[in-house]
Image (tube, grey):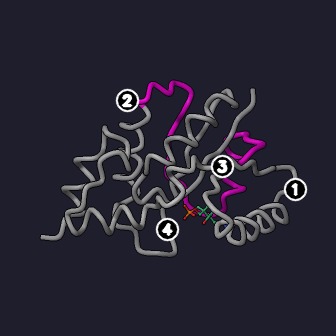
């Protein structure tokens, strides 16, 4: 069994995340999405809300070998617990490289047997991030096509400025 972990804050999940997840689900027998509970930034959505939204999007996308869970603590511990040898991350632009390089170095130090594999984001998603989705939704901007359709309304309603 080839098991992959796709970790992140997913605050909220974007269509770019879903794209990478779909690619990973073709490569691995099982993909565990690990939703980080305590992100450095105070999250807009609780871990429970993020997991629930991802589950909705995964079901709507028909990805049957994907399991979504929240995790706290070290990523390598979550990966070991799931029996995963691989971590999946997405890269949008060279600006992501420095950040990913550091995460990879820490994870390699902690557990050299676990390797990280990278998927390049589609060019049309290169500008897309959870933080700019949050900002657009807050000001009532159109996020159609930027987040999975199954969770678009929940995101717009929850984040829209009162
Ligand atoms: O979506 P993000 O916020 O860029 O994801 C970052 C994430 C979750 C991959 C990273 O913060 C993480 O793995 N945190 C768990 C703590 C940990 O293992 N730290 C060591 C690697 S930096």
Mark closest to the chain's N terminus, 3 or 1: 1
Q: CA distance from mark 3 to mark 1?
A: 23 Å
Mark closest to the chain's N terminus, 1 or 2: 2
SS category of the residue bearing label 3: strand
Quadrant of the snapshot with the C terminus: bottom left
From the image, state whether disc 2 or disc 3 is nearer to you: 3
The span picked out in magenta is: 59-87
Q: CA distance from mark 3 to mark 4?
A: 26 Å
Q: CA distance from mark 1 to mark 4?
A: 24 Å
* Other-residue count near label 1 (Cα within 10 Å), few / some / many at <14 / 14–19 / ≥20: few
SS category of the residue bearing label 4: loop
| Left or right placement of residue 1 versus residue 52 in this view | right
Badge 3 is on which residue?
Answer: 120
| Left or right placement of residue 138 versus residue 133 in this view | left
Badge 2 is on which residue?
Answer: 60
Instruction: Looking at the picture, tell me which residue is in the foreground, 86 or 27.
Output: 27
Q: Is residue 157 magenta?
A: no
Badge 4 is on which residue?
Answer: 38
Mark closest to the chain's N terminus, 3 or 4: 4
């Amino acid at each position: 069994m080839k098991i992959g972990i796709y970790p992140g804050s997913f605050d909220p999940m974007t269509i770019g995340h879903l794209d990478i997840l779909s690619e990973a689900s073709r490569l691995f027998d099982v993909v565990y999405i690990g939703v980080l509970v305590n992100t450095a930034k105070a999250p807009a959505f609780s871990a429970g809300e993020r997991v629930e939204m991802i589950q909705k999007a995964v079901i709507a996308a028909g990805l049957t070998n994907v399991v979504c869970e929240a995790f706290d603590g070290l990523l390598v511990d979550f990966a070991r617990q799931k029996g995963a040898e691989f971590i999946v991350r997405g890269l949008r632009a060279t600006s992501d490289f420095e950040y990913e390089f550091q995460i990879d170095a820490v994870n390699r130090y902690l557990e050299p047997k676990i390797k990280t594999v990278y998927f390049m984001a589609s060019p049309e998603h290169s500008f897309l991030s959870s933080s700019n989705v949050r900002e657009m939704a807050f000001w009532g901007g159109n996020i159609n096509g930027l987040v999975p359709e199954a969770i678009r309304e929940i995101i717009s309603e929850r984040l829209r400025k009162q």
